[in-house]
Image (tube, rainbow, N blue to C red):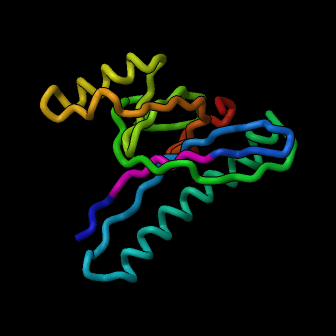
């Protein structure tokens, strides 16, 4: 059985004028029978559809408030492991996230993110100290983002 997986998809939106905007969406890839390739494909399509819906909403309603230029978007990374509680629950907010491999977290500094990694993994399973860490200022959306008051967006 393929397990349900929460994915954090990081997108970059850029235009010819060199502006850049980053969007982080959290979607769920549903579980499926692992011996069934069609079910695997359907689970991935489900996650893709949810991400596309969130991206389209952000582009139409929020990105246009910041920048009315035409943007091209591309997927930068997909993380499956979040180490910060700020990535649970509702989105609709700006965050400073840090990522490495398939791990993502919210922290104000790289040192704080590395401390979170240490607390999350413990001393025995900690990723190597030379692990490359990258920060991104993002707008964060989830499938729960529509449950609140959109005046907060």
Q: Quadrant of the C terminus?
A: top right
Q: Main secondary structure of the magenta part?
A: strand
Tell me what residue is drawn at x 38 percent, y 51 percent: 6
Tell me what residue is drawn at x 42 percent, y 51 percent: 7
Query: 129 left or right of 136?
Result: left
Tell me what residue is drawn at x 37 percent, y 30 percent: 84
- Answer above or below: position of 151 versus 56: above
Quadrant for residue 67, please give it: top right
Residue 126's x, y, as percent? 22, 32
Q: Residue furthest left?
A: 124
Give the magenta-colored segment's residue range. Answer: 5-11
Count the labels in the image. Answer: 0
Query: 146 left or right of 65?
Result: left
Query: 73 left or right of 31?
Result: right
Residue 80's x, y, as percent? 37, 48
Question: Is 133 part of what is drawn in magenta?
Answer: no
Q: Quadrant of the N terminus?
A: bottom left
Quadrant for residue 10, please give it: top right
Q: Residue furthest front?
A: 130
Residue 52's x, y, as percent? 61, 59
| Front residue of this view, candidates 13 and 128 | 128
Quadrant for residue 111, please give it: top left
| Front residue of this view, candidates 99 and 58 | 99
- Answer above or below: position of 12 versus 151: below
- Answer above or below: position of 41 versus 8: below
Question: Is 9 part of what is drawn in magenta?
Answer: yes
Tell me what residue is drawn at x 44 percent, y 31 percent: 133
Residue 53's x, y, as percent? 62, 58
């Amino acid at each position: 059985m393929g397990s349900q997986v929460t994915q954090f998809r990081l997108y970059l939106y850029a235009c010819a004028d060199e502006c850049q905007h980053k969007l982080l969406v959290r979607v769920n890839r549903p579980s499926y029978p692992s011996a069934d390739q069609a079910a695997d494909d359907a689970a991935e399509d489900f996650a893709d559809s949810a991400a596309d819906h969130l991206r389209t909403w952000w582009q139409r309603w929020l990105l246009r408030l910041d920048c009315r230029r035409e943007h091209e978007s591309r997927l930068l990374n997909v993380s499956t492991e979040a180490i910060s509680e700020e990535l649970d629950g509702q989105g609709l907010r700006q965050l400073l996230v840090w990522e490495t491999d398939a791990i993502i977290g919210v922290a104000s500094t790289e040192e704080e993110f590395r401390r979170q990694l240490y607390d999350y993994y413990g001393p025995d399973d900690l990723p190597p100290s030379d692990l490359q860490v990258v920060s991104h200022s993002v707008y964060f959306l989830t499938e729960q983002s529509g449950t609140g008051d959109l005046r907060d967006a």
